[in-house]
Amino acid sequence: DAGVIQSPRHEVTEMGQEVTLRCKPISGHDYLFWYRQTMMRGLELLIYFNNNVPIDDSGMPEDRFSAKMPNASFSTLKIQPSEPRDSAVYFCASSSGLAGALSYNEQFFGPGTRLTVL
Amino acid sequence: QKEVEQDPGPLSVPEGAIVSLNCTYSNSAFQYFMWYRQYSRKGPELLMYTYSSGNKEDGRFTAQVDKSSKYISLFIRDSQPSDSATYLCAMKRPGGGNKLTFGTGTQLKVEL
């Protein structure tokens, strides 16, 4: 398996522009997570999906951020308009739910998208 | 106050040293405790996973959980330069829908 795939790997954009990050989870996984990592705040969960349905979006910083999962093999995280403080590494992760919601299912992370907003 | 606290380091040790990495937490509902390793410019990968209290050993790595003190540790024996990475602790409560809460990570450098 190719693992979690993210694109682009690097994105440099100007303030005010729309940014779209993409993720392809591991085939067969029914959970998908979007994280943001910065030096100051560490790794923060933004939103996660179960069976393509958003379950918890309490980590989404503001209305400028939106995420979709139109099918089991694709998700997007969109920032519009982008601001310099959005500069961070954005990770997508996926997991199965085989161990059940009461237990732990390993999350597999993608390589991340390094976003720089000028 | 954050739910999970972790000293960011950096921590620099000589090759062969025993390394101790730690996290404290405030939410007593956490039952699952993980350590992820993250190499520079890569995504985190699971290193060890422990349920509830106790120790777990895997090769040179030992994970320890003390729920009474809300304190978890990762020990690395005979540290190698290849262990140089950022180590993130993560925690989950039962029924949390696979949602993890991460520490900020400790940067470790093992020097020759």
Image (cartoon, rainbow, N blue to C red):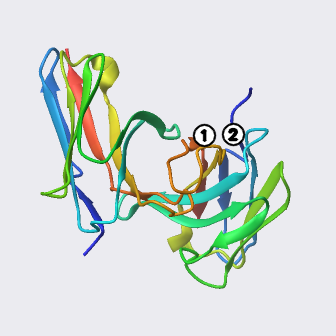
Which mark's residue is nearer the viewer, 1 or 2?
2
Residue at position x 33%, y 56% from top? B103
Badge 1: few (under 14), some or many (20 or more) residues near its Cα, within 10 Å? many
Tell me, yes or no, whether the two marked residues, 1 and 2, touch with CB atoms within 8 Å. yes
Residue at position x 30%, y 68% from top? B3
Task: Say whether disc 1 or disc 2 marks the residue closer to the N-terminus.
Answer: 2
Q: Read off the residue under disc 1.
A: A111
Q: Secondary structure at mark 1?
A: loop
Q: Is residue A109 left or right of residue B86?
A: right
> How far across and how far down the image is residue A56, in percent?
61, 72
* Residue B2 visible from this viewpoint: yes
> How far across and how far down the image is residue A22, in percent?
76, 53
Chain of the residue displaying label 1:
A
Q: Are marks 1 and 2 on the same chain?
A: yes
Instruction: For the C terminus of chain B, give its image quadrant.
Output: top left
Q: Read off the residue under disc 2.
A: A4
Residue at position x 82%, y 52% from top? A74
